[in-house]
Image (cartoon, grey):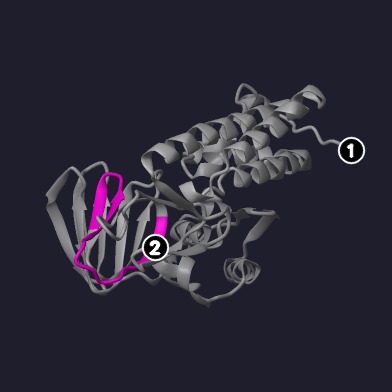
Amino acid sequence: MILIPKAMDSENKHIDPVGLLPKFLSGDATPEVKRRVNEWLSADPANQAAFEAFVKIWEMTSTVTGTDDIDLDSEWRKLESAIIPVRTIPFAWKRIIQVAASIILILTIGIVGLKITGSRSEKAPMHELSTLNLPDGTYISLNAESRIIYKKGFGVTHRNLSLKGEAYFEVEESGIPFIINAGEASVRVTGTKFNVKAYADKPEVKVTVTEGTVKLYETDQPQHEASLNAGATGTFDRSGKVIKKQLSVNLNDLSWKTGIIDFQNTSISEAAEVLMNTYHIQLEIDPALGNCLLTVRFDNQELDSVISVLKSTLDLSVIRRKRYISISGKGC
């Protein structure tokens, strides 16, 4: 039986939820887009089934990692296999496949660009971490859906790369500076260990240093920089173009990699941000809980265990639909 995805409620019926999926999956979605997609997903199990089918196509098209691995004929076959069923399945599913086919087409065009520019792209899957070794020996852990891009000659003529999302770097010593472009802010090192959080929908770029020294600076104004030693945190405010330095590290900035979460009188809204980034879920908090504070530590515990502790500690009501969780309560 083929499931037909249903539309959102009448208030949002003019919104095409399927058309929002590429932004939702790429990590570029605004909070409003995320809210609308999550409402659509929770409206009917058929929508969740359609979403999972779309995710499979999305992940299929994001597996190309470099010019040596590209098979143009194979990519075009993927495009054709996605387009042909449009003639034989119900209208609602046609929209899913039309959007997916357009993604494959854009990917294929991008592959031609990769052939010309010699760039290489590495992206972590949805809901999963990935690790990789760069040609210079640098080791990188990528948070879910995060991406790095670097050009030909990396480790020989340069060590420049772009980051979209979040990654932990263990940079090998070299006479060539290691430079990370994170949009409005950049990071320069020679050899050290640090975390960079640079999500497009967040107001700041944050660098957490665990070893060595890191230079955080405004990309267009490299003279505007801050030197960060081990145990320090630096943030670049995108709107104000201001760099702030703090001589401490918040363990929760590394929880996605270490699995250690430490809440000390932490607001539940801040805790929700940490949990979403660590467990790769969508978490909606009742505004009535805004004044609630948490003091609890988790060490590599499963999400169900964490939610259970929070539920009992604050007498919360929890509704869970796969990777979407809604938490409500009386407040504090």
Asked if residue 38 is positioned above or below residue 18 in the image, the reply reads below
First in residue order: circle 2 vs circle 1: 1
Residue 181: x and y in percent read 29, 50
Q: Nearer the viewer, residue 291 or 68?
A: 68
Q: Nearer the viewer, residue 157 or 288?
A: 157
Residue 79: x and y in percent read 65, 32
Residue 179 lies within the magenta run: yes
Query: Residue 226 falls in which quadrant of the image?
Result: bottom left
Report how far apart the C-alphas of labels 2 and 1 lie in the structure: 46 Å
Residue 49: x and y in percent read 75, 43
The residue under the point 37% across, 40% down is: 117
Query: Quarter holding the N terminus?
Result: top right
- Left or right for 79, reference 32: right
Query: Residue 315 falls in which quadrant of the image?
Result: bottom right
Q: Amino acid at mark 2?
A: Leu
Mark 1: secondary structure? loop
Asked whether residue 65 appears in the rendered view, the answer is: no
Q: Amino acid at mark 1?
A: Met
Q: Nearer the viewer, residue 265 or 166?
A: 166
Q: Please report the bounds of the magenta region as a residue range.
A: 166-187
Asked if residue 60 is positioned above or below residue 302 in the image, the reply reads above
Q: How many marks?
A: 2
Q: Are marks 2 and 1 in contact (CB under 8 Å)?
A: no
- Left or right for 122, reference 187: right
- Left or right for 1, reference 214: right
Asked whether residue 62 appears in the rendered view, the answer is: yes
Q: Which residue is mark 1?
A: 1
Residue 207 lies within the magenta run: no
* Residue reaching furthest to the right: 1
Residue 74: x and y in percent read 63, 40
Q: Which residue is mark 2?
A: 134
